Image (cartoon, helix red, strand yellow):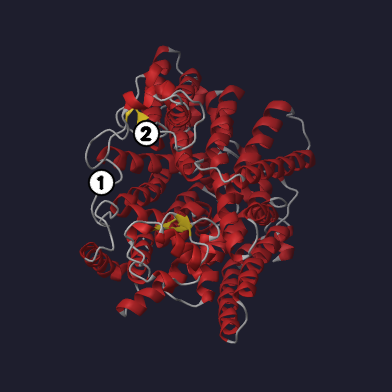
Amino acid sequence: MATQASTGGGSDFLSNLGRIYGFYTGGFVAFVLLLAVLEIIGVPNKILGYLFVFFTLAVYAIIGVLSRTAQVSEYYVAGRSVPAFYNGMATGADWMSAASFVGMAGTLFLLGYDGLAWVLGWTGGFVLVSILIGPYLRKFGAYTVPDFLSFRYGGNFARGLGVIVLVACSFTYVTAQIYGTGIIASRFLGMQFELAVFAGLVGILVCSMLGGMRAVTWTQVAQYIVLIIAYLTPIVILSTKIYGMPIPQLTYGHAIADITAREQEMLANGLAAAASLKPHIQPFLSYSPLNFFAIILCMMVGTASLPHILMRYFTTPSVREARQSVAWSLLFIFLLYFSAPAYAAFSKLEVYTNIIGRDLSAIRPWLFNWGELGLIQICGKNAVNIDAVIAACKAVAGHPGVVRLQDFVINTDVIVLSTPEIAGLPYVISGLVAAGGLAAALSTADGLLLAIANALSHDVYYKMIDPNAPTARRLVIARVLLLIVALVAAATAATKPGDILAMVGWAFSLAMAGNFPALVMGVWWKRTTSAGAVCGIIAGFGLCLFYLVTTRYFPGAGVKYFGMTSLLNPVTGAPLVDIVKAMALPNAMESWPTLAHPLANKVGWFNLSNIACGLLGAPFGFAVIIIVSLLGRAPSREMQAYVDEIRKPRGRTVLEEKTT
């Protein structure tokens, strides 16, 4: 593997991929079984946690180093030699971010039915990739999304706008992944969070720095194998343990019925207040119907517009394999997303059964591991130890001495990681899940960092600053920029920004508004002009960004100058905030307020939450592209012929020189 990987991913290496990853999978399963034996004979949990994290990081690092390259096409697009099956697996890992692996089940746990908006949107996006965009960008022969925008719309202005959209979408997203590695490393390595963030960063850099897209591709295949095993194992065990069937997707309905029964029981026994209990299967308790379907649409279209996802389809040998690759991507993503609702249901059932109603003096010690990190609270205080919990609950008037639902607060990011502990499973399962979460965060961070660094080095430096730069200098610039972007993202994550998970959702809306109209019209409407596309990107992306920034960071100005009103409670239809009273407060016009500000994220237009601002930006972008294009001269016949050629499933790659 080392020889082939270092000589350009030769045919022997590619023909033996099945054997190589088969041995890798077997080796990983054997490693997990070995740790299970070590746990049985009494090896401390902390040692097992270190072994899990360091072993998996070491394997990824070895693959990254063996895949080092000094060839531009290998660094940017893995030599366009990745078979569809493995590209689909790598795309699955690229897509399975910490938000998907760690946050998806947590969101479904917290929101119940309304959390399905994220599952439906993120999965459906790959259908749009397959039908509208992915194969055509592969036929074009680009290295980056701004590459396509520059060629199709003539010049560096469109390229520069593409880079701005790419960085805006990707930076907050990659910061969230590094934040995820920090949470996992701080819990399972016992490190301070701020240090754990940079420890995770080392793992990210060794995967991507030397080999670029080729190293990232083969590392992501390995990471997908780890994360899918880690995700499915706990719920297969729980499904078998509770219902006698090892297929959690089929026992999911039983779990839902048991949750509903337990909800009624908790209400009857005073263990839950009606105000704090959201029935798991009741829709539109957290999102209004408008925002529910707006999130589905924004996540779907945003998925089809994210540069680091679209880049994956530049690596296949042909257009046909790009299309097949999307189908494989859907299958590999389906395996996790089809399981996420079951994971959330089993987690909630375990919490309702094993935590709610438990005497305060009998709280299980694992809770304190998360409480020390500020991720689990009981009676309004961090659950750092038994004494702190008892003291906090004694301060609550009339507290019955047992954990009630309204007393218990768990961070959504902890649900997946803590479920094995909640259910009393062996520690080795917790370590396995942590390794899976780390693989998910690292794989997406690799893809995002590479997308940003490649855009800056290829589109800005090589295409706009120094077109005559030799290959060696281009790759040095790419690696230096990768390091700089990674350090800035890690420094941002170390501050624990409160909006980080919301920003992941914002990335999709920004990609939807900034990229989708220009990409779709560039492929499907020959009459689209350069002026139309440039104006459309500026208009759509600008409106979306304005809505995001104003509603979150300048809400007072939004109300006073732009006619924004309070968002409405999805259940009662009442305003979330009394605008008149809020605007009378001395801090009403405060800029960059904290989330505690009464207006932050609670105002807008049309009762539309800012996470779905792509619903404003994308239609506006399409409209501007169409109007401006019709007012100007049609593109040249040569350009229209290129567009025709891009849409043909066979034939030559439009930019032949890109493939060499």
Can residue 246 be seen in this snapshot?
A: no
Of all residues, the one furthest to the bottom in this rendering is 41
Q: Residue at x 50, y 47 (%)?
A: 319
Label drawn at residue 284:
1
Nearest to N terminus: mark 1 or mark 2: 1
| Residue 539 rendering spot, x and y as whole percentages | 45, 22
Does the CB distance between marks 1 and 2 fall below 8 Å? no
Q: How many marks?
A: 2
Front in this rendered view, residue 100 or 20: 100
271 sits to left or right of 443 = left
Residue 308: quarter of image:
top right
| Residue 598 rendering spot, x and y as whole percentages | 40, 33
290 sits to left or right of 625 = left
Label 2 sits on what residue type? Lys
The residue labelled by disc 2 is 602
Instruction: Using a 10 Å C-alpha cutoff, classify the residue at mark 2 as few (fewer than 14 neighbours), some (14 to 19) or many (20 or more).
Output: many
Q: Reply above or below: 612 against 532.
A: below
